[in-house]
Amino acid sequence: MTEVIATVQRAAQSAGRGADPGREWNPVYRVLAEESSRSHDTGTSAGAVGLEGPGLDLVARHLRSSALLVIAVTDGERTRSLRIGLAPSTATLERADGEGPSHWCEVDVQQVPAAVTSLLEDSGIALSPAQLSVEHQRDALRLSPAQSRLAHAALLHGAPAEEAFASIPDLDEAPRDALTATGPRVSLALTLHDPHRQVAEEPITWSRLWVHGRHGLYRLDQPASPALEVHPVADGDVLGSVLPVLEQGIRFASASAASGGAR
């Protein structure tokens, strides 16, 4: 099995040699490559220089992923992430741990759930059988307009999120627990990208975040409005979200591959 050890910067430099990747790369990697190129890290990472043959093909296909599923676990200052390029039958993986070089490989798409579970277990996240929690607006934990203004003002003045929300007066215990949680944070995002604009005119990104508080797990979805809403959920909500989102990504990748082959 082909495996590459390289930073995103070095992988992007190798895959982009002699050509402008332009709109072919997934938007996530366009941003990551731009951020890396602006950094002052000019060192050489093991396995990152002179990519060629199967290794170069692997990272090039991964950077062009039409459906990229990203799951990350942040605990304190450390973030471990798994970026998964989905295709009809295979998946390319980039495993990253902090600022070190990433590990890139390819697996059968049926092995992706096990790779996600392994990341969560290695990060100390308690897993339960997949169970997608149904949101009820009446159960959402919300800030009042006045509380939102106080939190926003504190954040603008540079206060850490935990301090900004902890200082809000008259905040109920449940939303305070969720918004000041210092336990591991799990984020999930799916970015869909069709360079041929046959399946989707513009890139689409969906995301979800979970935080561990003293009293349980809370879910924060990408907000559709300025009002912040937090939902208490069961531990199985993490895998309960991953599996249908993974299926959606595979369907999009299949449709994108079919439309590209028809051109």
Image: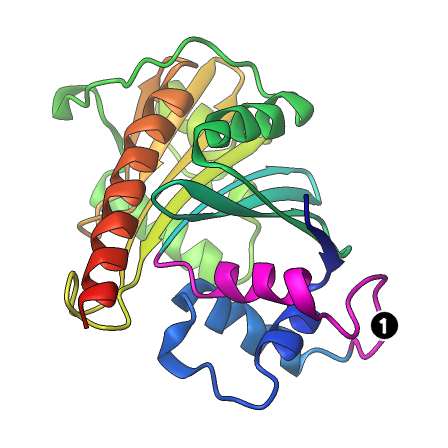
x%, y% of residue 152?
38, 55
- Residue depicted at 54% across the width and 67% down the height: 60
Q: What coloring was used for the rendering?
A: rainbow
Q: Quadrant of the N terminus?
A: top right
Residue 221 location, quadrant: top left
Considering only vertical position in the picture, is 247 above or below 65?
A: above
x%, y% of residue 137?
14, 26
x%, y% of residue 191?
34, 55
Please rate how many residues cluster around mark 1, counting C-alpha atoms within 10 Å: few if below 14, some from 14 to 19, many from 20: few
x%, y% of residue 245?
30, 36
Q: Is residue 57 magenta?
A: yes
- Amino acid of disc 1: Thr
Residue 44 location, quadrant: bottom right
Number of marks in picture:
1
Residue 148 placement, left or right of 32: left
Task: Answer whether residue 112 is visible to the viewer in this image.
Answer: yes
- Which residue was labeled with disc 1? 44
Residue 47 placement, left or right of 8: right
- Residue depicted at 71% across the width and 43% down the height: 78
Per the rendered image, the range of residues in magenta is 41-66
Q: Nearer the viewer, residue 64 or 229?
A: 64
Residue 67 placement, left or right of 3: left
- Residue depicted at 31% across the width and 42% down the height: 250
Task: Answer whether residue 171 is visible to the viewer in this image.
Answer: no
Q: Nearer the viewer, residue 134 or 197?
A: 197
- Residue depicted at 68% across the width and 25% down the height: 122
